[in-house]
Image (spheres, rainbow, N blue to C red):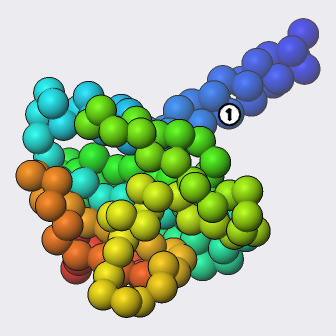
Amino acid sequence: MKQFKIILILCIASFCSVSAQQKDAIQWITFEQLEDSLNIKPKKVIISFYADWCAYCKKMDRAVFTKSDIVKKIKDEYYAVKMNAETKDTIVFENTAFVNRDHLTSRNSIHDIALLLASRQGQPFSLPATIFLDKNFKVRKRCFEYMSPKKLLSTL
């Protein structure tokens, strides 16, 4: 009976810990969810483009997007979208379908929506890519590098 109580206490503590971590995490949404959210309440947007192979993308997930001051700022002032830049999925946003046109002919092809939002004058797309948009969905800033917590917070 004593072992059962100990196991029960550990299970409850574990559940509470997971719930607290989820509460203190950025609530990443999809482009489809973003469209609905913007129609209800306009808000600034941060979009994080990543790829499964990108070490600096993973580092941002671990070391930057988990900082409490960054999480709070993003949750309070932004809609946060996270997207695999190499996805083959069709994404519908504002009645327009975006695809990854080159996924059949190119190994690490970039999705059209990532290219559209991240386009800069003549420079190639690179990861990690973080795009900041204002309430009117106009690009305010594009960053194509690992952003330290301090740099991301100052940009936000």
Kindly identify the residue that appears in the image at 36 percent across and 64 percent down: 116
Q: Which sits in the foreground, 97 or 24?
A: 97
Q: Is residue 58 left or right of residue 70?
A: right
Residue 24 seen in the current view? no
Q: Is residue 65 left or right of residue 56?
A: left
Q: Which sits in the foreground, 105 or 81?
A: 105
> Could you tell me residue 73's position as x and y percent?
24, 58
Is the residue 7 above or below the residue 99 in the image?
above
Kindly identify the residue that appears in the image at 14 percent across and 27 percent down: 40
Placement of the N terminus among the 4 image quadrants: top right
Q: Which sits in the foreground, 107 or 146?
A: 107
For label 1, the residue is 14
Placement of the C terminus among the 4 image quadrants: bottom left
| Tag 1 secondary structure | helix
> Could you tell me residue 82's position as x and y percent?
47, 53
> Could you tell me residue 53's position as x and y percent?
73, 70
> Could you tell me residue 2's position as x and y percent?
87, 17
In the rendered structure, which amino acid carries the disc numbered 1? Answer: Ser
Residue 119, image quadrant = bottom left
Q: Residues within 10 Å of mark 1 (few under 14, many from 20)?
A: few
Q: Is residue 145 left or right of residue 104?
A: left
Kindly identify the residue that appears in the image at 64 percent across and 66 percent down: 109
Query: How many numbered marks, from 0 up?
Result: 1
Q: Residue furthest bottom?
A: 122
Residue 116 seen in the current view? yes
Kindly identify the residue that appears in the image at 58 percent across and 71 percent down: 57
Q: Which sits in the foreground, 117 or 69?
A: 117
Is the residue 44 above or below the residue 142 in the image?
above
Residue 13, image quadrant = top right
Is the residue 37 above or below the residue 77 in the image?
above
Q: Is residue 24 left or right of residue 21?
A: left
